[in-house]
Structures are given as C-alpha cells and as structure tokens.
C-alpha cells in the first residue's frame, strides 16, 4: 500500500504542476504540500516532497526549480506557448467549417494544453455564439473518410447539397451521388474542400466538405490518376478562392496601381504583371470565370477591367445587364 501511495503521490504531484504552474506561476513546496492535502487528502513532509520532485526531474520531465529560501517549482514542457494556443483557438472559433458545438469541444481540448490560469484567460476572449457556422455535424467524419480514401487511392461516392429559397437543404445532381477520385484536401476561406476528378463531368473539380450530405463511401475502384500536367499548388491559385467548379481560363486584367496588393493577395507574389503607364498595370491570371470572379471584379468599381479574352469580357457584360433588369 505504501508503494502504491508513493506512486499515486508522485503522479498527483506531476498533475498539479502541469495544471497549475508555468514560468509565471511557480508553486512553492508549502503550496504543493497544501494542494496535495486539499485535492487528494495526502499528507507529505518537505523532505519527501523534495525527493518526489527530484524523481520527476531525473525522469526527464520538464520540472524547473527556482531556488531560494523556499524553492518554487513549475512545469516547462508544454508543446504550445500561450500566443500559439491563442492562434489555434481563434482559428477553430472563426472556422465556418466547424459547427458551434464541435468548436467548443475542440477548444476545450486545446485549453488542456496549458495551465488553468492561462486557460481561463484564453477562454475570456473566445466568442463563438452568433458566428456564421456550418450546420453539418458530420464534418470530422467526412474529413476522416476522405483522408482514408486518399491514402488508399480509392474513389469516393457522396451526395452533394445546396439550399433552396426556403433554406431547405436539397440534393444536387438530380439526387445522384458524385463519384470522385480524391487528390487532396484544401483549407481555404474558412472552409475545407476536396479536389479530385469527377467521373460524371470528366474533369477536376472542387467540392466543399460541409456541403457533403454524409460520410462519403469509399469505393473499391482505384482513383483516376491526376493528369501529368496537374499541379496542386498551381490549381489552388487558379480556382478563384476555391468557390467554383468551372474550368480555369487565362484572363488579362487592366488594373490601377493601388490594386496590386489585392492581386498579390489573391494570386501570389509571382503573379505575371506588366506596367502599362504611371497609373496602370496588366495582370495575367488564371481563374474560374464564374459569378464569384465577376463579383470580385465589380467590387473594384472600375479599378480592375477585363481585357481578354473577349468571351470572358462579354460574359461579364451579360451578367451586369442581367443585374440591371427590373
């Protein structure tokens, strides 16, 4: 019993240091003695406590000591610093892909990676309720299934959804499943997307994971190999903000100089540009010429104009005329 008591005491001591201490919150031997008594009803003297702490340190655990008339100890083996955890917590809380309930659960797990004081400080700055969030609770399982399919190089089958005018989720593709050879999962604009070859359309497309109705079925069929010229990094740039499934097309844009930052933000620092005059430059980009792209152009109020190809320019004019109809 005495041996088991020693084992438990050392374990409880370690748990206290992990949960309540860090470099800014060291705990004295007197405080450790009191906490063992209050939390676990264990009586321990100073010498025994010092020996237990030495065992923890000699075992390779990150227990640091501040030596003084009364030594103070803290745990220094955390994987994440508080600023790093803040970034992770903010990413989870702001993600539209993760539901509100799942966000709260995941943040709760993240907060166990720091001590109780830091966790309380981080929690005071978390605002989840009221944010735009996915209503698809199956997101985790969808990601897991697609990851497995990518590893196994197998096709997946899934139902894809949209919303009608009554805010009701409806099944696209005439209620039929999409058969897709998944190549990669991409996080973009707060959403997850799967990139792969779609059998029914015979081309590479992107699908938003929160719009997949339920966990995809992993088929026995081997995936269609990606084309030799397919480059994931380049494709990620050309599919405009990953919202569209149209074929990418090369477009020439005439831009005012102040738009350069937005062009670089959207298409990368290596985007092909050429000075036209003191006020304008040309940008050669590859995009999905869809309503999302045209809305982005319109938002610049004439500071960005489509120069080529004429088919894209005409389609933009057609969309503008349609919008003006009463």
Image (spheres, helix red, strand yellow):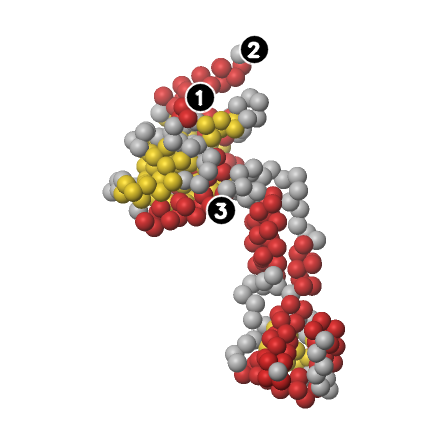
Task: Find the residue positioned furthest to the left.
Answer: 228
State the quadrant of the C terminus: top right
24 or 104: nearer the eye?
104
Which circle marks residue 140 in the picture? 3
Q: Is residue 317 above or below residue 140?
A: above
Against 48, residue 193 (above or below) is above
User: Real-space Cα distance between discs 3 and 1?
Assistant: 38 Å
Nearer to us: label 2 or label 1: 2
Q: Looking at the image, is mark 3 or mark 1 nearer the viewer?
A: 3
Q: Crowding at label 3, few (<14), some or many (≥20) Cα neighbours within 10 Å? A: some
**First reached walking from the N terminus: tag 3 or tag 1:** 3
Element carrying mark 1: helix
Closer-to-camera residue (313/43): 43
Number of marks: 3
Mark 2 or 3: the one toward you = 3
Q: Earlier in the sequence, mark 2 or mark 3?
A: 3
Residue that extends furthest to the front in the rendered view of this protein = 1
Circle 2 residue: 326
Disc 2 packing (10 Å; few <14; some 14–19; many ≥20)? few
* Residue 21 vertical placement versus 30 (above, below): above
Which of marks 1 and 2 precedes in the sequence? Answer: 1
Residue 285 lies, in percent from the top left, at 38, 35
Residue 151 screen position, x and y as percent = 34, 50
Please state if 237 lies on the left or on the right of 50 as rendered: left
Answer with the quarter of the image where residue 43 lies: bottom right
- Labels 2 and 3 touching (C-beta < 8 A): no
Q: Which residue corresponds to mark 1?
A: 316
Element carrying mark 2: loop
Of the pair 71 and 282, the residue shown nearer to us: 71
Look at the numbered disc 3 and give the secondary structure of its residue.
helix
| Residue 174: % across, % down | 40, 23
Residue depicted at x 66% and y 84%:
49
């Amino acid at each position: 019993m005495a041996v088991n008591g020693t084992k438990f005491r050392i374990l409880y001591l370690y748990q206290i240091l992990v949960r309540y201490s860090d470099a800014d919150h060291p705990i004295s031997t007197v405080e450790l003695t009191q906490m063992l008594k209050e939390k676990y009803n264990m009586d321990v003297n100073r010498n025994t406590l010092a020996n237990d702490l030495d065992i923890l340190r000699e075992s390779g655990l990150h227990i640091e000591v501040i030596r003084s008339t009364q030594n103070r100890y803290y745990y220094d083996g955390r994987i994440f610093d508080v600023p790093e955890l803040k970034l992770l917590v903010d990413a989870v809380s702001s993600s539209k892909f993760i539901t509100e309930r799942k966000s709260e659960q995941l943040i709760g797990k993240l907060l166990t990676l720091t001590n109780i004081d830091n966790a309380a400080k981080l929690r005071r700055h978390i605002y989840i309720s009221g944010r735009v969030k996915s209503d698809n609770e199956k997101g985790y399982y969808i990601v897991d299934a697609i990851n497995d399919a990518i590893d196994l190089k197998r096709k997946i089958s899934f139902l894809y959804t949209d919303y009608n005018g009554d805010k009701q989720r409806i099944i696209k593709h005439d209620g039929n499943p999409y058969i897709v050879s998944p190549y990669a999962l991409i996080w973009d604009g707060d959403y997850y997307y799967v990139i792969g070859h779609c059998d029914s359309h015979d081309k590479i497309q992107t699908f938003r994971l929160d719009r997949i109705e339920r966990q995809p079925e992993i088929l026995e069929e081997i995936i269609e190999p990606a084309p030799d010229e397919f480059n994931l990094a380049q494709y990620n740039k050309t599919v405009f903000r990953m919202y569209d499934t149209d074929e990418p097309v090369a477009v020439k844009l005439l831009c005012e100089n102040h738009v350069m930052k937005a062009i670089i933000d959207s298409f990368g620092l290596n985007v092909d540009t050429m000075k036209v005059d003191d006020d304008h430059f040309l940008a050669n980009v590859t995009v999905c010429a869809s309503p999302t792209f045209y809305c982005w152009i319109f938002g610049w109020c004439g500071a960005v104009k489509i120069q080529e190809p004429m088919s894209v320019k005409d389609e933009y004019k057609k969309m503008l005329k349609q919008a003006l109809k009463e």
